[in-house]
Image: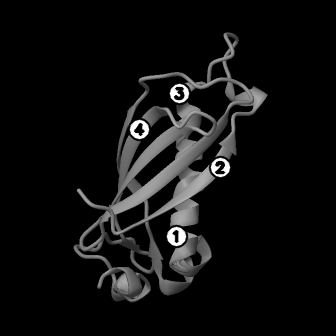
Amino acid sequence: MVAILAATAAVTVPFQDCDPMGVTWHGNYLRYFEEARRALFTQIDYGYQQMQQSGYAWPIIDLKIRYPHPTTVDQQLLVKAELLEWQHRLRIRYQVHDADTGKRLVKGETVQVAVAIANGEMCLQSPAILQQKLAPWLD
């Protein structure tokens, strides 16, 4: 599936993210995905404060991740987030690459839905504000 837009974040694996073997603990990749997702939303001027101000939260309801190759302490990574779907949910694909070699190390995907903050109800379609923010990329 072709991405609507994409953003990349640089991440250096910190010491505290690794297990005693020096390999990144699997749960920390979610933070790396978050850095790329934040860059993606910043690109369309719909960061977390703007989401809240517009009356919507976007919780993750599904997560998939695969770890074909480990990362290690002080490794330089490029984490790419690509928006694949937006009409009824946000589906974002992630790829983690070694910054020096370009080798893909980890991949994943999240699904998020809009929830109206006022009543806590899940929306059956993405709110109009998201379409407005994405308009330049939807042509």
User: Foreground mark, 1 or 2?
Assistant: 2
Q: Earlier in the sequence, mark 3 or mark 4?
A: 3
Dot 1 amino acid type = Phe
Where does the image place residue 11, in percent across and percent down from the top left? 67, 44
User: Foreground mark, 3 or 4?
Assistant: 4
Q: Report, in whole angstroms, how far the alpha carbon at label 4 lies from the one at label 2.
A: 15 Å
Q: How many marks?
A: 4
Image quarter of the C terminus: bottom left
Identify the residue under disc 1. 41
Q: Earlier in the sequence, mark 3 or mark 2?
A: 2
Judging from the image, what secondary structure is the residue with disc 4 in? Answer: strand
User: Foreground mark, 1 or 4?
Assistant: 4
Q: Report, in whole angstroms, how far the alpha carbon at label 3 lies from the one at label 1.
A: 24 Å
Judging from the image, what secondary structure is the residue with disc 3 in? Answer: helix
Mark 4: give few (<14), some (14-19) or many (20+) Cα within 10 Å: many
Dot 4 amino acid type = Lys
Q: Earlier in the sequence, mark 3 or mark 1?
A: 3
Q: Are marks 3 and 4 in contact (CB under 8 Å)?
A: no
Where does the image place residue 45, in percent across and percent down from the top left? 55, 80
Mark 2: give few (<14), some (14-19) or many (20+) Cα within 10 Å: some
Q: Report, in whole angstroms, how far the alpha carbon at label 3 lies from the one at label 2.
A: 18 Å
Where does the image place residue 131, in percent across and percent down from the top left? 34, 84
Dot 3 amino acid type = His
Identify the residue under disc 4. 107
Compared with 69, 31 (above or below) is below
Identify the residue under disc 2. 10
Identify the residue under disc 3. 26
